[in-house]
Amino acid sequence: MKHYAVLLITSLLLSGCATQAVPPQQAELPPPSRLMLYQSVPQTPYATVVVVRDSGMLAGSCRTGVYINGEFAASLAAKEKAEFRVPVGNNEVSIGQDMVENSLCIWRDTSGRLPMTLRAGESRYFRIAGDMRRGFVLQAGRP
């Protein structure tokens, strides 16, 4: 019986560490100092890429770097979103180390590199999720 109790408590603790999706309408904007690229409305045709970071206790004090086409574009904390106006055509969104604040965050595992072809006026949504085994993960999201 003790084994079952330990398994139950362990699973409850680990599930409490998972992150929860935040709808883009409810996500907060980071300060402009943490938004680096693709913030202006270009004169040429463009598409919009929205990246939202989940809420939750898991690495909640750490920020995640968002990269567009290999360039550091934003630093996102939990429950924040960034919107980018990117050129049409082939682009790539990925996540990695936060280049704004290199804090003592020990949970730096990230994975996710999503290539895409964008058309003028199109919007794409992405989610930065996290779990204890995989670290931060970039996934396709919803509006």
Image (cartoon, helix red, strand yellow):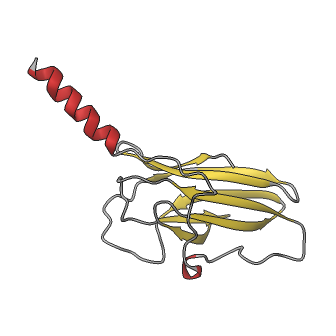
Residue 120 position within the rendered picture, expressed as x and y whole percent measured from the top left: 88, 59
Q: Quadrant of residue 11?
A: top left
Residue 20 drawn at (x, y percent): 47, 46
The answer to whether residue 42 is left or right of residue 92 is: right
Residue farthest toward the left in the current orientation of the protein:
2
Q: Relative to residue 59, is residue 29 drawn left or right?
A: right
- Residue 51 located left or right of residue 116: left
For residue 42, above or below residue 63: below
Which residue is drawn at the image coordinates 47% and 65% (left, top)? 77
The percent position of residue 8, horizontal first and vertical second, equals 22, 27
Could you tell me residue 31's position as x and y percent?
A: 55, 78
Q: Residue furthest top?
A: 1
Q: Residue 44, relative to residue 142: is it above or below?
A: below
Which of the 4 quarters of the picture holds residue 27?
A: bottom right
**Residue projecting furthest to the front:** 26
Q: Residue at x 39, y 44 (%)?
A: 18
Q: Residue at x 62, y 66 (%)?
A: 82
Q: Residue 40 or 90: which is nearer the viewer?
A: 40
Q: Residue 89, located in which quarter of the rendered image?
A: bottom right
| Tally of numbered discs | 0
Quadrant where the image shows the N terminus:
top left
Compared with 7, 118 (above or below) is below
Along the line of sight, which residue is nearer the eye, 88 or 143? 143
| Residue positioned 46% across, 61% down in the render | 78
> Is 135 on the left-hand or right-hand side of 94?
left
